[in-house]
Image (tube, rainbow, N blue to C red):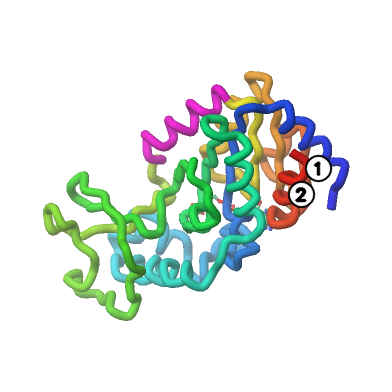
Amino acid sequence: MAESEIEQAAEILRDCTCLLVFAGAGLSAESGIPTFRDQGGLWEEHRVEDVATPEGFRRDPALVWRFYAERQQQLATVRPNPGHFALARMEQVFAPDGFLLVTQNIDDLSERAGSRQIAKIHGDLMAVWCTRCSWRGSMDEPLQPEGLLADERTLPSCPECGSLARPGIVWFGESLPKAVINQALAFSLQAEAILIVGTSGAVSGGYGLAENVAALGGGVIELNPQETCLSHLANVCIRASSAEALPALLAVL
Ligand code: APR
């Protein structure tokens, strides 16, 4: 691994009392959840427009619900990897107020590894939102994909108004949830460093967080095997996998 980059990153982190982590699909890749942009525009063999846009849901809500039911089922087959556990430990190092994990991931692997200070800016696989009223809830159990048919009566509905419910995921073309992104932005104004893990940065959100930290003189560390559109903001780029490099970073803190 890139030992000298780890040491440079550790120097930034040792001086830091308030750390923002911005994570993407790469963090969960080594748990067996595929990333998005490494798959040529397909997501688990579906076109992203069909399963991750409001238009796709309007066109075929049963297909979209089945797709997310499969992702929910997948959660039971995967486990947090050493990267998730290292971030949960880092949170304790910076506790109680000096840490926030802003994640684009909709899985629950960070929570299962012990992270508590999390802002999920793209929603959550188990969340469910009404398409008509403001009701928002969460499922206790994964849905069974086979039971979800074209007949809307088989699809989840709102307990308040009875309308069709949708997965609680922020799709392409939708705005990020205001309260959560405001929390992330506010934290970026007090953070002394940002650690960007496993994200291509191709979707808006991360750029503003890293720019805020950099503009206020904070350190920017990128951890990603590949160069990304956020790399030019970084003081240090660790070109390694997160399951390998996050425990190494924790160890030198
Ligand atoms: N460790 C660290 N990084 C990794 C690893 C790994 N083991 N494996 C892959 N990566 C990196 C890739 O190099 C890539 O830069 O993870 C990144 C994954 O990028 P994306 O697939 O674009 O995922 P992400 O940045 O999270 O995408 C943002 O786009 O489709 C939407 O809503 C979806 O949340 C998602 C968002």
- Is label 1 within 8 A of ligand 1 (CB to nearest ligand atom)? no
- Dividing the picture into quadrants, the one containing residue 91 is top right
Q: Which residue is mark 1?
A: 6
Residue 182 falls inside the magenta stretch: yes
Q: Position of residue 86 (x, y in %)?
A: 65, 50
Label 1 crowding class (10 Å Cα cut-off): few <14, some 14-19, many 20+?
many
Residue drawn 67% across and 41% down? 229
Residue 181 falls inside the magenta stretch: yes
Residue drawn 48% across and 45% down? 116
Of circles 2 and 1, the one toward us is 2
Q: Amino acid at mark 1?
A: Ile
Image: 57 above or below 234:
below
Q: Position of residue 209 (x, y in %)?
A: 56, 32
Q: Secondary structure at mark 2?
A: helix
Depth check, front residue: 118 or 241: 118
User: Residue placed farthest to the left in the image?
Assistant: 161
Depth check, front residue: 195 or 99: 99
Q: Amino acid at mark 2?
A: Ala
Where does the C terminus fall, quadrant-wise? top right
Depth check, front residue: 35 or 21: 21
Residue drawn 74% across and 31% down? 14
Q: Are marks 2 and 1 in contact (CB under 8 Å)?
A: yes
Which of the two discs, 2 and 1, labels the residue nearer the N terminus? Answer: 1
Residue drawn 52% across and 30% down? 97
Image: 70 above or below 89:
below
Q: Position of residue 189 (x, y in %)?
A: 54, 23
Q: Position of residue 205 (x, y in %)?
A: 52, 37
Q: Which residues are magenta?
A: 176-190
Question: Rounded to the nearest whole Å, what is the CA distance between mark 2 and mark 1?
Answer: 7 Å
Q: Is residue 46 left or right of residue 246?
A: left
The chief SS type of the magenta part is helix
Which of the labelled discs sits on residue 248, or is there none? Answer: 2
